[in-house]
Image (tube, helix red, strand yellow):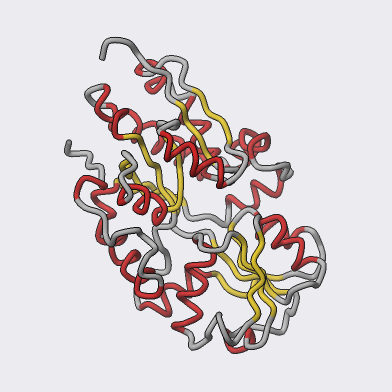
Amino acid sequence: MSEPIALRIRGLPVPPSIMLARAAADTRLQDAFPGSNFAVWSDAVAMRSDLKAGAVDLCVIPTNLAASFHNQGVAVRLIAVTVWGILHVLTNRPEWESWDDLRGARIAIPLKGNMPDTVFGTLAARAGLDVEGAVTAKYFNSYVAAAGALSAGEVDAAVLPEPAATACIEAGSGVVRMFDLQIEWGRLTGGAPRFPQAGAVAATALLQSLHGAGHIIAAAIGDALAWMDGDPDAAAALGEPYLGGLPRHVIAASLRQSRGEMKVAAEARPELEAFYRTLIARSPDLLAGGLPGDDFYWSAAV
């Protein structure tokens, strides 16, 4: 590499951005890529635009979106899975406890076609609940809007990730957790009570720019994730400026609900492919071309 490059590290206003902010300051990463910086995307539109334009070097995005971009020719590779499910169904009907209770309900679903929508629809179908017919799905452009509709009583339930789920409950409007969708995933699919929801994605050019670049990034991310899990209060303090105005105590409470584990992409491939197959059985075009090939999965052996 002729000149060190400063990495453009980006994330959405969600908890994995805390990990990225911590990793961006890692001494090993800064030594290899001086001046690397972290910033938050304003929304998913900006995220998609930057990825398609090659204007980001490292980010955390949903694993299905990473595979879809790769299949469409965007030069990215999955480094590791870091989020193993942070989705919940909340309700303002505390007596509700089964999928059948949702029959005829108004359900707020954020970001149509993205992970909350896809996972909820997949599990509802396995539970015998047709989202297109048995419920009234109301789609919102943000987690905040979906949570607000539930708190205001405009809907009966909402599909929300952390930390939006914890924030909605702590708002004090009588909202409770109905389902942990990770537990439901295990129960309804016969697999583990988790799924590879999101992971760290790097530009292929970055991985080719310096021998060992992938290992440096993986080490920084792995240590940052372990720090987040070990000290949620400190992680919440770091993350407060990045998470859309959520107060620190809500972020910390949310982190205690999360499933943090880093698994290198090549090692996580069996779980990823099982997850992908389950999703595309319901949404065949989700990955824009089927299962990604070998070159999508980064391996520590390289």
Instruction: Examine the image and state in which quarter residue 161 appears.
Output: bottom right
Identify which residue is drawn at 53% across, 28% down.
Answer: 38
Q: Is residue 255 above or below residue 19?
A: below
Q: Is residue 197 above or below residue 174?
A: above
Image location of residue 79, percent across then percent down: 32, 42
Nearer to us in this view, 2 or 302: 2
Instruction: Examine the image and state in which quarter residue 88 appears.
Output: bottom right
Identify which residue is drawn at 53% across, 32% down.
Answer: 21
Image location of residue 169, percent across then percent down: 73, 62
Location of the N terminus by quadrant is: top left
Image location of residue 196, percent across then percent down: 39, 58
Specify whether 111 is left or right of 74.
right
Specify whether 244 is left or right of 223.
right
Nearer to us in this view, 120 or 94: 120
Q: Is residue 42 above or below residue 36?
A: below
Specify whether 124 is left or right of 107.
left
Location of the C terminus by quadrant is: top left
Q: Is residue 220 above or below residue 87?
A: above
Image location of residue 288, percent across then percent down: 34, 58
Identify which residue is drawn at 30% across, 51% down.
Answer: 71
Nearer to us in this view, 237 or 121: 121
Instruction: Examine the image and state in which quarter residue 292 appears.
Output: bottom left
Identify which residue is drawn at 34% across, 34% down.
Answer: 203
Q: Which residue is situated farthest in the top direction here?
A: 2
Q: Give the tally of numbered discs.
A: 0
